[in-house]
Image (cartoon, rainbow, N blue to C red):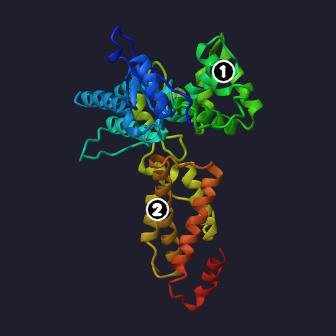
């Protein structure tokens, strides 16, 4: 239980207008304090300098003010004719500024982060209540640097942990901070900050620091390496937050066209559309129908491999050419015709599925693993389908070969 937690919001010359807050205090002790001070007992939760305080865990309802401010801003902007690039600027400046104060104080619940992300995503793509618009890029991809094909929007949870790492450094270095000295006296006492566990008497803000500490150590590997990393992020007595942020967030692969799209000579709204036009599979060219099937080196490599698998080496045509070639085959019930048509359609479906997975679910594997995954998936789908086709006598050998795949 708590020893004694007292937070006085304001003092006036009238004790009956001054509130005192106590948690985990026995009833007889509480009554004695109220009698001696003549203060009015306040109730949890309450707000101090705009930050919610509670004797227990903070829940989503305590962040109603933050959510209301974000919604109010986004709702007013949604009525204006603002370009995509303008919307991103507003999210990066105003909305990020609203979050900054809360992120620097405590760890925001994931439920609140999901709501803020939802509001910003709907604002960016123009979605409204009851009206859905096409989302052309997953929010996870949007929250990546320009060098990784994103729009340089800060990811809230990682940035929240990043700012709290600054307070970890202040506590660890025993800096001349009244807050740090107080925590060393009452929370850490004779223990070690990096090894101490959470106790029932710890406040929500201190619990947040310990949770971020655990995440940082787990990310880097050891306590010694975590402390060394924080020390390398200090320059001129201040922490370089971008280094910590790059460590805590999940990185994506670099793109080769970043300088061609994001530079001073290009209008921002033009850069935005150019990023959306880039193929998410090869990240090297505009994603149109002709490129995706099969000019893209990603899809063309898979199709060549499957052609070799079907014994059609030495030829690789684009999607329309392949359809034209298939349409002019005479023996349309021949096993070769069935094999090619089944394989082609399965490949188109698998490539489209992989593309959508990257865009909407932000799921992306290394190129070599992704290519191998699609190849094996197409081979499996084709084999299962053709093995249910009644074979003629001269096709049994071929279908047996499919079964061995």
Q: Quadrant of residue 234?
A: top right
x 51%, y 77%: residue: 385
Of residues 238 and 14, the one nearer the viewer is: 14
Observer-side mark, 1 or 2, equals 1
Q: Earlier in the sequence, mark 1 or mark 2?
A: 1
Regarding residue 150, the answer to whether it shows in the image is no
Query: 10 Å neighbourhood of mark 1: few (<14), some, or many (≥20)?
Result: few
Residue 405, position as x, y percentages in the image: 65, 73
Residue 328, position as x, y percentages in the image: 43, 71
Numbered circle sitting on residue 185: 1
x 44%, y 18%: residue: 36
Residue 166, position as x, y percentages in the image: 60, 22
Q: Quadrant of residue 14?
A: top left
The secondary structure type at the circle numbered 1 is helix
Check disc 2 and report the residue beneath it.
349
Query: Would you say 9 lies left or right of 404 here?
Result: left
Is the Cβ of the residue at disc 1 closer than 8 Å to that at disc 2? no
Q: Residue furthest bottom?
A: 393
Regarding residue 26, the answer to whether it shows in the image is yes
User: For the N terminus, which image quadrant?
Assistant: top right
* Mark pair 1, 2: CA separation: 63 Å
Of residues 123 and 227, the one nearer the viewer is: 227
Query: 10 Å neighbourhood of mark 2: few (<14), some, or many (≥20)?
Result: few
x 73%, y 38%: residue: 221
Query: Would you say 105 lies left or right of 302 here?
Result: left
Height in image: 116 above or below 400? above
Numbered circle sitting on residue 54: none
For the image, the number of numbered tags is: 2
Residue 403, position as x, y percentages in the image: 63, 79
Of residues 313 and 192, the one nearer the viewer is: 192
The secondary structure type at the circle numbered 2 is helix
């Amino acid at each position: 239980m708590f020893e004694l937690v007292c937070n006085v919001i304001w003092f006036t010359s009238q004790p009956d207008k001054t509130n005192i807050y106590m948690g985990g205090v026995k009833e007889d002790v509480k009554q004695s304090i109220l009698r001696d001070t003549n203060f009015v007992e306040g109730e949890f939760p309450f707000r101090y300098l705009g930050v919610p305080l509670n004797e227990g865990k903070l829940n989503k309802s305590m962040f109603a003010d933050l959510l209301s401010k974000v919604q109010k801003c986004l709702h007013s902007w949604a009525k204006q004719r603002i370009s995509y690039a303008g919307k991103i600027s507003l999210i990066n400046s105003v909305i990020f500024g609203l979050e900054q104060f809360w992120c620097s104080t405590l760890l925001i619940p994931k439920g609140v982060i999901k709501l803020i992300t939802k509001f910003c995503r709907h604002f960016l793509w123009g979605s409204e209540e009851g009206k859905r618009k096409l989302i052309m890029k997953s929010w996870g991809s949007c929250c990546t640097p320009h060098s990784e094909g994103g729009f340089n929007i800060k990811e809230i949870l990682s940035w929240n942990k990043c700012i709290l790492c600054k307070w970890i450094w202040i506590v660890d270095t025993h800096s001349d901070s009244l807050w740090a000295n107080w925590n060393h006296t009452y929370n850490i006492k004779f223990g070690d900050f990096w090894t101490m566990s959470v106790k029932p008497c710890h406040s929500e803000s201190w619990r947040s620091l310990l949770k971020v500490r655990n995440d940082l150590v787990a990310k880097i590997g050891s306590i010694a390496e975590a402390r060394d990393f924080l020390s390398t992020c200090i320059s001129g007595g201040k922490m370089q937050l971008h280094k910590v942020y790059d460590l805590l967030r999940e990185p994506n692969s670099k793109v080769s066209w970043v300088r061609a799209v994001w530079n001073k000579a290009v209008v921002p709204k033009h850069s935005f559309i150019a990023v959306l036009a880039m193929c998410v599979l090869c990240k090297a060219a505009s994603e149109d129908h002709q490129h995706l099937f099969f000019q893209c080196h990603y899809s063309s490599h898979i199709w060549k491999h499957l052609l070799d698998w079907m014994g059609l080496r030495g030829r690789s045509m684009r999607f329309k050419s392949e359809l034209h070639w298939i349409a002019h085959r005479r023996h349309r019930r021949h096993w070769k015709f069935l094999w090619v048509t089944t394989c082609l359609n399965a490949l188109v479906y698998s490539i489209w599925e992989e593309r959508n997975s990257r865009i909407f679910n932000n799921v992306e594997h290394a190129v070599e693993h992704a290519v191998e995954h699609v190849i094996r998936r197409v081979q499996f789908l084709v084999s299962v389908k053709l093995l249910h086709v009644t074979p003629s006598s001269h096709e049994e050998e071929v279908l047996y070969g499919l079964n061995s795949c």
